[in-house]
Image (tube, grey):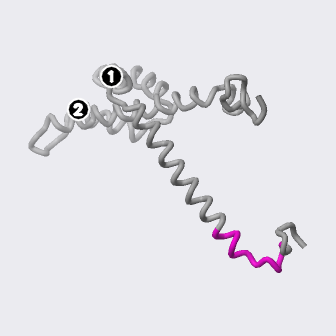
Amino acid sequence: MGGGTDDNGRMHVPTDAFGGMSPEYKAAAALKNLFTMVAVRVVLAQEQGYDNEGGAMTETYRGLQDYLAQNPLRDGNKWLEDLMRHDDNNMRLTALRLLEVRKAYAGGQFDYEDMHALAVEELTKENDKLMADYVKDSMSLNTTESMGQDGMGT
């Protein structure tokens, strides 16, 4: 098939576009990082909730918050791997808890269909706005300056 599509009718994405990864694999990697951060936020919220008086947070809460502040989460797997090697046994156990929470969230809580619908909806709105802005800007160009009446240049 022509027009940049493969035999299956899908767009052809060059294999070197994302370091040899498919766009779906790249998105899955980003989602893993998102799910790791969700797990961190869920555990922090759970630990914060243990103290209904609003006083001091739990040891796990403080330790996880401090670890996150000192080690920004860029690669979820690497971040968890490092946390599993933490000097404090409580933090190593927290890492195992985070593994379970992110698996549970990814496996049953995250709404993939809603994400797809939102992504397409937002992309469509943004494309429409960008196209409208482009047309608006094109209409306001002074056609006698750098472009001729035919839009091809002088």
Mark 2 and mark 1 in contact (Cβ < 8 Å)? no
Q: Identify the image quadrant of residue 63.
A: top left
Q: Residue at x 13, y 45 (%)?
A: 54
Q: Secondary structure at mark 1?
A: helix
Reading the image, the residue beneath label 2 is 59
Q: Residue furthest left?
A: 53
What label does residue 104 carry, if any? Answer: 1
Report if residue 29 is visible in the image.
Answer: yes
Q: Whole-percent x and y of residue 143?
A: 79, 77
So how many labels did they put on this image? 2
Question: At label 1, which amino acid type do we have?
Answer: Ala
Q: Residue at x 51, y 28 (%)?
A: 28
Q: Using residue 75 as the reference point, say whether residue 11 is left or right of it.
A: right
Circle 1 residues within 10 Å: few <14, some 14–19, many ≥20: some
| Residue 17 part of the magenta segment | no
**Whole-Å distance between the Cαs marked 1 and 2?**
24 Å
Depth check: 24 or 75 in front? 24
Q: Using residue 16 as the reference point, say whether residue 33 is left or right of it.
A: left
Q: Which region shows up in magenta?
A: 136-147
